[in-house]
Each structure stands twice: as C-alpha cells, then as structure tokens.
Amino acid sequence: MNKENEENEFMEQLVGEYENVTEEDFAIYEEDAVISTEQLPKLAREFVKTALQVSHQNETPAAVSFFVLLGQICKDFVHVGSGMNTEDTRVHFTWIQTSGTGKSTLWNFVGPVAEKVHDKINNGPRHPNMVWKDHNLPTLFNTFSLTDYTDSVLIGKFSKDMGEEGEEWTRIPGQLEGSGLAHWDEFEYSGVFKPTSHNEKSIVYLNTLMNTLAGESWVITKALSSFDNQVMHCFSQRSVIAMTYPPENLTEVIANKGVLQRMLLFVKEVPEHEQHRMRLEQLSKAGTFEVVNQPIEEFASKFYAIYTLLRNHFDANGRNPQKTVTYADSFNDALIFEYENLAAYINNTSPHVRAVAQNFTTRLMKILMKMSVLCSIAEAPQIKDESKRFIVTGKNVRQSAHIVRQCYSTLVAWLEQGLKVKRSAIAEKSLFSVFVKVYAELPKDESGFVPKNDLLNGVMKSGKKSQASVYNYFRKIQNKFEMDKQGRSVFIRLIGDEE
C-alpha cells in the first residue's frame, strides 16, 4: 500500500470518531487575546494599544512583535536555562493571515521602532562583542528585509584582490549577518512553502540561525566552490519576524516542515464578513488623508531604557548571562500548570491533529519560558527596589501564557479545519466509487444507458446518504456522464463505459 493510500485509509477511519473543538472553546481563547493586553507589562500594553491604531484587531500579533523586539536586544545579556539545555532570549514569529488585514500596516509601526532602537544601541556605549572560536564579532543592529535569496546575498562571499604579497581574499559578509531583525513581508517566497533551486538553501540558513546562541550550532558555514572552496562563516544573531497570507499547502507545511515548529506561529483566516467590514471602512475614507502620529521615538527610548538597565545589571553581576535573572519558586509551578493547560486543550481533538500539535508543544514551552523572562525584564523599570528586579515569577509566566495559548489555539483551529476539508474530499472521492459500483450493477439498454433516478436511488441506498447529499454531489460529477432525455425520463451513461 503506497503512502497516499495509507494516509487516505487513516483519514477514513477518523470519520465517525472525529470530534471538532467547539466554537465556544475558541471564543474563550479569542477572549484571552483581549485579556492579555490588560495583563501584560505596562510597556507591552502601551505598545499593543498604539499598534492597534493602524493594524486593527490584531492584538496577538502586536503583542508577539513586542517580545520579538525585546528578546533581540536582551539576547547577549541573558541565557535561559532548562537543565542541560540553554536558550537565548530571541523569539521568532511567523504571522499567517488573510491578505489585506493589517500585516504590512503593523510592520509599518514595528519596523520604525526597531530601527530607532537599533540606532540608539549602535550609537551608544559599545555593545559587547560575541566571540566565536577565533572570531571576535563586533555587534551591529539593523534589519534584514530582502527578497533575493542567493548565497552571496544571504551569507556573503569573498573577493580576490592583488595585494603586496600576491593574491588576497577579502571577506564580504552577507545580509543575514549581524544582530537585529530578519523580516520577511512575503514569507511565501522564502522557500518554506514553495521550495525552488534559488531559495531552498535559505531554509537551512533559517533553521541554523534560530539555534540557540548559547552554543556553536547557530553559525552558518558553507564552502563556496566558486571561490576556491573558501569557507564562509555567517554570524547571524537575528530574530525572525515573517508574514504571509495562508498558502494552499499550509496544513501540510505545518505538519511536515520543522522550520515553522521552531517559531511562535499565529495563523488566522479572517472571515468574509470581517473583510467586508474592513473594505467598507477603507472606502469610507477614500479621498481623504489620515495621519496617525505614532510615538516611534517614545517607544524606542523606552526599549533603550530597558536595554540600558539590563546591561548595567549584567555588568554588575559579573557579565555572566546565566546569572542575569533569577527565578522565584512560583516559576516552575506556573510553567507546569500552563503545560497541562495546553495538553488538556488538545485532548478532545482527533489523533491526527493531536499528533501534529504535540510537535509544537516542546518548542512552545521553551518560547513560554523566554517570554516569561522578557516580561520580568520589561517590568524592571517600574520596580523601585533594585533587589526585586529581574526575578522571573509565576505572574510573568501567566502574562506570557495568554499570548502563547492564543497562538496555539489558532494552530489547532487551522489543523482542525484542514482535516475537515481533507475528510470531505475523501468522502466525495469514496462516493464517486459508489456511483461507479451502482452503475455497473444496474441493468442497461443496448447502448449502456441506465435510468438516472435508478442510479441516484441506488447510490442513496448503497452509500447510506441522504437525497440532498447524493443530488448535490451528482451535480459536481454530472460531466462524467452522458445524458439522453426521452420524454420526461432521463437516462445516463458513464463516459468511457460505452461499447
């Protein structure tokens, strides 16, 4: 039995046992998205509130973007431990949502804030350099945002020049190198969803740069054959923020591509009535010029204030990223509680959905740990007692858990919907085989025609389907039959079955 038949058989077995998560369940999680904006640290709440002025009803993506920005500027000062594993504070985010519903407009706010923060760090006291083997890596913060995915653009190249001692190789770093953000406004062309010879390598690079900075596996290494096999090292310490509309093969990619499982994923198909309302709102403003005065400089200054406070604390504690933050007793209990919440949420889903969703669970818990640490860091400026700063508590876990849970629920909802569509396709395919079977068993005239009503009634009985289901399906496949009307009677013959 080939792979496709095995999968179809498994899907057919789910018919009758599949229990969909109720709309009420998802309504609770939608409500969580609003609640979270009230429970997040003060700066995060202000950030989300401002973002919603231009990117309406996108609370969760705005909140995640806050953590992406904060995690990036904290990465060299804090490591998050989990037994034998150590993570940096970077949060990588993929936002998949219907076109024209606020993705680009949110970036028009997030991008300028990031740029201002990066400028302040680059122009301030020198950021600590990272040392990798014999490489001393000066840190420069900026934003990578390209659509050209060739090796030379992404990871760099060498140029051969004639020097005093003969031929010399000069290293030219690629655009991925450095700190800051790696932004994809059209992530559908990255190679994740439609691999091509030009962009398939970018997925390997993307996976590599998302490895923890508390090790050596994050460095992209490639021997460039066109440069006499010179070895190019690309030192990318960026945080990924990627946006796209839902591609046709999204469910398959979610299930099979590990790159998305390493990010915080928010996926949403905006309902048609909501899109209609948004278009009406846009049309009502046609012919006018609306100016929204976003406090870009204000937010950049507040992010930089957190950066400065954390850096000073890092210096005062021996410049050891493992000792920058501490953890309250309530931290672990809250993490376990939230993990059990995620596990319980998918208990009533189908085995197929549960299997895919569980592939994300371990990564999501790591992200939850990072975001909890970032909540503690974001609250530090409001804590007067310095001895109580940078302590990660159960409250910080609960703050970030609202966001993680909302992202998880959208993932499960998408998988559920994808399964329903596939089951429907399988059911329709199976119903056509019933048509063929019943047609073959019916007595035919000398030309191979059978009464249409006899065929439809036979399918209803054999397939145990309602009249409406059989008639509706027949309309989809009637082009597979030749029809002959004699008076008020209709006879049909399966095309290709004629003698």
Image (spheres, rainbow, N blue to C red):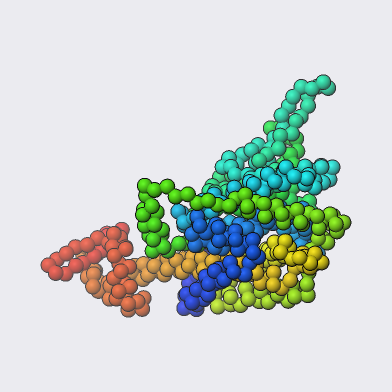
| Left or right position of 127 against 49 | right
Question: How many labels, in total?
Answer: 0
> Which residue does the image show at 78% across and 44% down from the upper left?
126
Q: Quadrant of residue 95?
A: bottom right
Question: Where residue 124 sits in the image (x, y, percent)?
Answer: 75, 45
Which image quarter is the C terminus in? bottom left
Nearer to us in this view, 87 or 218 = 87
| Left or right position of 376 against 4 | right
Q: Residue furthest front?
A: 384
> Which residue does the image show at 64% across and 64% down from the upper left?
42
Question: Where residue 28 sits in the image (x, y, percent)?
Answer: 53, 75
> Which residue does the image show at 75% across and 68% down from the upper left?
392
Question: Where residue 353 sits in the image (x, y, percent)?
Answer: 55, 70
Question: Where residue 7 sits in the image (x, y, percent)?
Answer: 52, 66
Nearer to us in this view, 355 or 291 = 291
Is residue 112 something that shows in the picture?
yes
Q: Residue furthest right?
A: 318
Q: Quadrant of residue 429?
A: bottom left
Is residue 3 something that shows in the picture?
no
> Which residue does the image show at 77% across and 57% down from the upper left?
310
Nearer to us in this view, 420 or 175 = 175
